[in-house]
Amino acid sequence: MIFKRKQRASGLATTVSELEDAVAARDGDRTGRAFATMIESVQSAPDDARVAAGPRLAALLPAFPPTGPRPMLAMAAGFCVEHGADPVACAGPVLDGVHRDLLDALEFARRWSATGEAGEELPEPDGKIVDDALRARLGGDPYEATRLALAWCSVEEWQPPALAVLCRSAEVRRLHAAAVLPACRELAALNRHDLKCLAYALAVLDDEPVVVLHRPTGSGFEIRIGGIGDNFQLHTLLAHVLIGGGHVPGTPPSAESVRLATDPEPARGRSEAVATGAFELLAPDGTRIWNEGLPDDIPVVAGRRLLVLDKPSYQRSWNADRFFPHLPGTAELTRVLTPDETRAWSAHLSAPAADHPS
């Protein structure tokens, strides 16, 4: 049994070496054959082989032909991360590749719009559009035009490997997310690609202090959050910390909904657990911060994110599963604000929520 495992591990290592050599030699046919063999090998290899292969596959991305199946190579590296490879070691090339294709897709959209009729919609990201007529429309070097069109058509394929590294390491998010997020949001705003998961993962806050004012009691708190995928999860954890901790009145969330939000072990499938809303989440100007949104939506005021909690305007509940199964959230009460501090932060607020339409 040990011999067989060593054989299989060696098989993947040898396959990756052949791919490395083919890419270095700029031999297209050899690269294609080695790539196909690698894809097959990585799926059947044991995890110890994937652990070793992941960083090597990621390191090939910068040298891999831009018009080749680069997202699939990234997926292979991401698959290795899902099976134990170091996300930090793999993240740089993967997220650089994501960023490059996002920018290329945006350049595709710019050229398409510049050469089309007024009001003409951008095309669906379908590989069938890549033809000689499209290359002529984009202008410039035909190779570059092909690269831009392929990026437009394949950018969503980068999401799985990007999520593999982003959801497994706060260090990865700290080092890379801020640089990639603007391009992701800009492309998503064109409404031709579903990039919600990528945008949410890039916007996750880590080790972030938030000033929280509870309007009904006039109390204030500093809460440090991290790894929270959306405001449903944030809402649950705020209720757990503040109501469950006895700091404000209300019904605390169930132990199961808290576990689902915080468990370091990845979530396995969909649960039937339900979380119930305890607050209205508001920005300092009184506008609602939606549960469907992100902690990143909380405005920064005087150097800190400032969140207001008010009585819920209506009863709401939701499935308690977290948005990212592999990303546990944290929320820690670091201190209760003094009355003077609470008054100082409250001076930044607009009229009470009751004065704003819901």
Image (cartoon, helix red, strand yellow):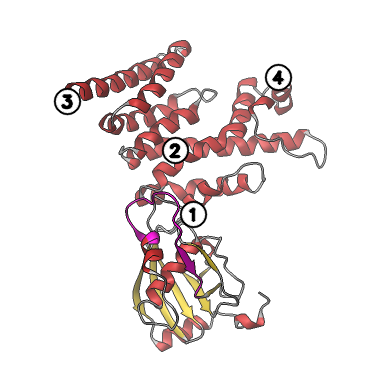
Q: Name the residue carrying label 2.
A: 161
Gap in angstroms between the C-alphas marked 1 and 2? 16 Å
Q: Nearer the viewer, residue 3 or 155?
A: 3
Gap in angstroms between the C-alphas marked 4 and 2? 31 Å
Name the residue rendered at 45%, 81% in the picture. Answer: 250
From which residue to which does the magenta span run? 260-278
Q: Is residue 238 left or right of residue 117?
A: left
Magenta region includes residue 99: no
Is 123 located above or below residue 227 in the figure?
Answer: above
Gap in angstroms between the C-alphas marked 4 and 1? 38 Å
The part of the image, by quadrant, that contains residue 292 is: bottom right
Number of disc labels? 4
Q: Is residue 286 left or right of residue 86?
A: right
Q: Nearer the viewer, residue 4 or 49?
A: 4
Residue 132 numbered tag: 4
Q: Residues within 10 Å of mark 1 (few under 14, many from 20)?
A: many
Helix, strand or loop status at disc 3: helix
Residue 86 in percent (x, y) is at 31, 39
Pointers 3 and 4 in contact (C-beta within 8 Å) = no
